[in-house]
């Protein structure tokens, strides 16, 4: 078990964590990471934040320096796109940047292919100035288009779109966010939070158009405007952030069960017991919410990476985590714990107008989720309350004068 040959597909947060955790557990076998990207595993969150604004340089994006992988004998194969999984022969076919094909065999396979942006249908998909944001290369493209740009249109009022809006306002662009739903952040949070962020962005000069759909993007060589159900908006740069889709094709073609992600059990084992999966691409059981969920967060990628490493070592520690996530916009640190989809009650602590407040969501009397704006202690404590199903005194919780530690 300690001498197996492990091949990991995908060079992101989860892949790096699987390899690191295996070595931490004194795994002695071979570890290869095959990544379609030309960069060592890096953190994506700064891409729409300090890396886009130019406050963080690329060196600081990398999860580990090259020397780490060398010292740990982890074979990172960049620009290696896996084309096919042959489960019968336990091998993969992959193509290199120069188009050459090669194969690699495995004893255990880990699929950590993440997600890819949902694409907007375009008459001219080669129009310059239209961007998605998932990788370092995407940001380099955006930075080029930003030179001399004045008007940015962001399609999609989710986290990535709003983070880009915040950075772009700081860079002096005129910014319009076009959102199809009736409010921004609709998929992920409550009206209280949506309304706060809507007002805050407007106070910073961002125009937000909700209940507005995009009918097309105009331009000859470069983008010139965006056609919407509420009229035409001038644009010399467009960033599309309308969600992501799990990269599951490889698994699907190989006959591994998928369903809005690669289906895994609590040990991150797929429908093939030799194949594990971690990160954004998995659909996994949540012990707490008692349903299958797919998450797009650093925390999940790290924790599932650790779970996969344990399972490969046959330690079998079930994945049992309360999800958490963050988003930085302007000077607002937004921290989210848990999932609030089906709350039946919520409590607001603090005042939105102070730019520091929290919303706690309850179901059947138990806290299931929290959204905290510039309120780190509330976020940290709520993660414990949720996990432990703590009995929270709602009156105390509402009173910001009472320490968050004293509300149970
Ligand atoms: C702009 C942006 C901002 C974000 N901000 C936050 C945040 O603030 N907080 C937070 O918690 N999360 C944030 N996230 C989400 C977070 O980055 C992801 O949840 C995390 O990166 C998931 O890690 P992963 O390893 O599952 O996938 P990824 O990091 O996406 O890695 C997947 C890798 O697999 C590679 N790959 C795919 N298919 C193949 C193939 N066939 N062959 C070889 N390689 C392949 C991809 O190229 C990629 O390198 C953000 C994401 C983005 C894009």
Image (cartoon, rainbow, N blue to C red):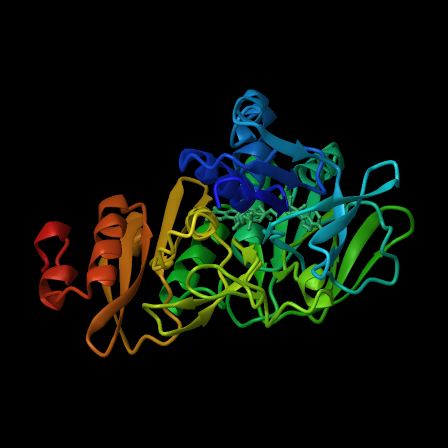
Is 101 located above or below residue 277 in the figure?
above
Residue in front for this viewpoint, 10 or 93: 93
Seen at 40% across and 38% down, the residue is 25
Q: Position of residue 232 (x, y in %)?
A: 75, 62
Residue 245 picture location, percent across and down: 64, 62
From this view, report whether residue 133 is shown above or below residue 382: above
User: Going by the image, does 284 lie left or right of 174?
Assistant: left
Work out whether residue 106 can be spotted.
Answer: yes
Q: Residue furthest right?
A: 220
Camera sees residue 351: no
Looking at the image, which is closer to me, 127 or 151? 127
Q: Is residue 142 left or right of residue 375?
A: right
Residue at the (82%, 50%) spot, across then down? 223
Whether residue 335 sits left or right of residue 298 in the image: it is: left
Question: Residue 42: x percent and y percent?
Answer: 57, 35
Residue at 65% across / 48% down in the picture?
106
Residue 116, given in percent of the width and then of the height, sits at 66, 55
Q: In terms of image quadrants, where is residue 256?
A: bottom right
Residue 41 figure quarter: top right
Depth check, front residue: 277 or 7: 7
Position of the C terminus, as image quadrant, is bottom left
Tell me the residue at 64%/46% (across/down): 10
């Amino acid at each position: 078990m300690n001498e197996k040959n492990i091949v990991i597909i995908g060079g992101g947060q989860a892949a790096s964590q699987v390899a690191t955790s295996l070595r931490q557990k004194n795994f002695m076998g071979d570890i290869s990471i095959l990544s379609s990207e030309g960069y060592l595993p890096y953190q994506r969150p700064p891409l729409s934040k300090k890396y886009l604004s130019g406050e963080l340089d690329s060196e600081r994006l990398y999860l580990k320096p090259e020397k780490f992988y060398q010292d740990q004998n982890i074979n990172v194969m960049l620009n290696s796109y896996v084309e096919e999984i042959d489960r019968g022969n336990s091998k993969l076919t992959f193509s290199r940047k120069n188009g050459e094909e090669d194969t690699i065999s495995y004893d255990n396979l880990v699929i950590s292919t993440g997600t890819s942006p949902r694409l907007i249908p375009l008459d001219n998909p080669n129009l310059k100035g239209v961007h998605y944001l998932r990788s370092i290369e995407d940001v380099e493209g955006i930075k080029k288009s930003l030179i001399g740009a004045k008007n940015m249109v962001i399609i999609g009022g989710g986290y990535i779109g709003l983070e880009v809006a915040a950075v772009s306002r700081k860079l002096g662009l005129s910014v319009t966010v076009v959102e199809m739903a009736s409010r921004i952040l609709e998929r992920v949070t409550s009206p209280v939070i949506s309304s706060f962020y809507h007002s805050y962005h407007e106070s910073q000069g961002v125009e937000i158009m909700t209940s507005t759909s995009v009918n097309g993007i105009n331009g000859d060589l470069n983008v010139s405007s965006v056609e919407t159900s509420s009229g035409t908006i001038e644009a010399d740069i467009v960033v599309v952030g309308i969600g992501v889709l799990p990269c599951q094709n490889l698994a699907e073609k190989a006959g591994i069960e998928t369903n809005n992600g690669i289906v895994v059990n609590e040990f991150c084992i797929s429908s093939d017991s030799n194949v594990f999966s971690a990160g954004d691409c998995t659909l996994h059981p949540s012990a707490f919410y008692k349903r299958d969920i797919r998450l797009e967060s650093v925390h999940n990628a790290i924790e599932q990476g650790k779970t996969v490493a344990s399972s490969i070592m046959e330690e079998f520690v079930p994945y049992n985590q309360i999800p958490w996530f963050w988003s930085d916009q302007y000077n607002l640190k937004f921290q989210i714990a848990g999932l609030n989809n089906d709350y039946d009650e919520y409590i607001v602590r603090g005042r939105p107008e102070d730019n520091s407040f929290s919303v706690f969501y309850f179901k059947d009397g138990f806290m299931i989720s929290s959204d905290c704006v510039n309120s780190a202690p509330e976020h940290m404590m709520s993660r414990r309350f949720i996990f432990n199903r703590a009995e929270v005194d709602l009156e105390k919780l509402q009173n910001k004068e009472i320490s968050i530690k004293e509300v149970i």
